[in-house]
Image (spheres, grey):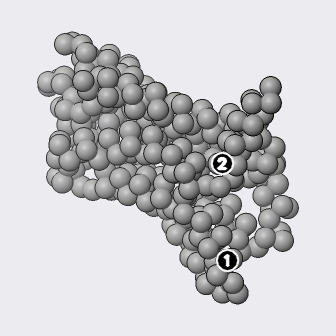
Amino acid sequence: MLCALFFLIYAITLTGNSLILLLTALDAALHTPMYFFLCNLSVLEICYTSVTLPKMAANFLSEERAISFTGCALQMYFLIFLGTAECYLLAAMAYDRYRAICSPLHYPVAMNPTACARMAAACWLCGSLMPMGNVIWIFSLPYCGPSEINHFFCDIHPVLRLACGDTSRVEVSILFISMSIIIFPFLMVLVSYACILATVLMATTPQGRHKAFSTCSSHLTVVVLFYGSTCAMYLRPKSSHVGDVDRVMALVYTVLTPVLNPIIYSLRNQDVKEALRRLKRRKTLL
């Protein structure tokens, strides 16, 4: 039953995010910075869930439930790589909304295709480079005790519990990098939305305020889900990590958030709904 459930969640995640990519590619009205970043987010979510969910579903069927040492290291690296890229990408999306609402006249110049491509590339580059040192350090530690990871996948703290030597220095390094990965982009999001809120409150018409809030509501929902769960997971001291709690929090940001993202953006976004209607009409005419 668990295998079927996680396979179904994986299929929904792939379908929903692929649909956003398809709609954006086929509909010229969605060729904007906002949907460019949303496409990057959808690619991230597809890759993110592919790192963990297929292996988790296979483990529910298998009695062996094993992963090689190298496989565990790669799974941890790609999990943190994609999670880091998502943290910075959500900050870039908040900056895009800030530019669109607070300085609409300069928006086409400030968020031109070259600038958007550079911002997205920077998010992916930060994701690929920032966790590399810590992952190498973690898997350079001696592991001479039990080889059973008390988790669904190779996450940082469950793996560190299996190390034999002193892990205090690597834990400090992990905390520092986690703060750089989570706190810095989260502050960028807060500053962007503080400026947006100030601008919206000065809007002269209720319609203007409603339009601005509806534009940002989907992104804010995703930000709360993702940053809330990652902060609760990685910005706590080692002593407060409990196996059952960690597993629940891990499911939120590795399973729940990716499957909800396309639903949130499609159900609460008129542009996506209109693009879907146009695509249906086009198929009907054909």
Query: Looking at the rendering, which quadrant does residue 23 occupy?
Result: top right
**Residue 267, position in %: x, y?**
54, 51
Considering depth in this image, is 38 or 76 the residue closer to the camera?
A: 38
Q: Residue furthest left?
A: 146
Amino acid type indicated by mark 2:
Val
Measured along the vertical axis of the image, is residue 271 above or below residue 139? Answer: below
Local crowd at mark 2 within 10 Å, few (<14), some, or many (≥20)?
many
Considering depth in this image, is 212 or 236 the residue closer to the camera?
A: 212
Q: Residue at x 41, y 54 (%)?
A: 225
Mark number displayed over residue 207? 1
Q: Do residues under tags 1 and 2 come within 8 Å of each other at their CB atoms? A: no
Q: Secondary structure at mark 1?
A: helix
Mark number displayed over residue 272? 2
**Residue 244, position in %: x, y?**
17, 43
**Residue 127, position in %: x, y?**
54, 42
Considering depth in this image, is 6 or 79 the residue closer to the camera?
A: 6
Q: Secondary structure at mark 2?
A: helix
Q: Residue at x 68, y 60 (%)?
A: 96
Measured along the vertical axis of the image, is residue 131 above or below residue 98? Answer: above
Mark 1 vs mark 2, CA separation in Å: 20 Å
Left or right of 199 in this view: 157: left
**Residue 117, position in %: x, y?**
75, 45
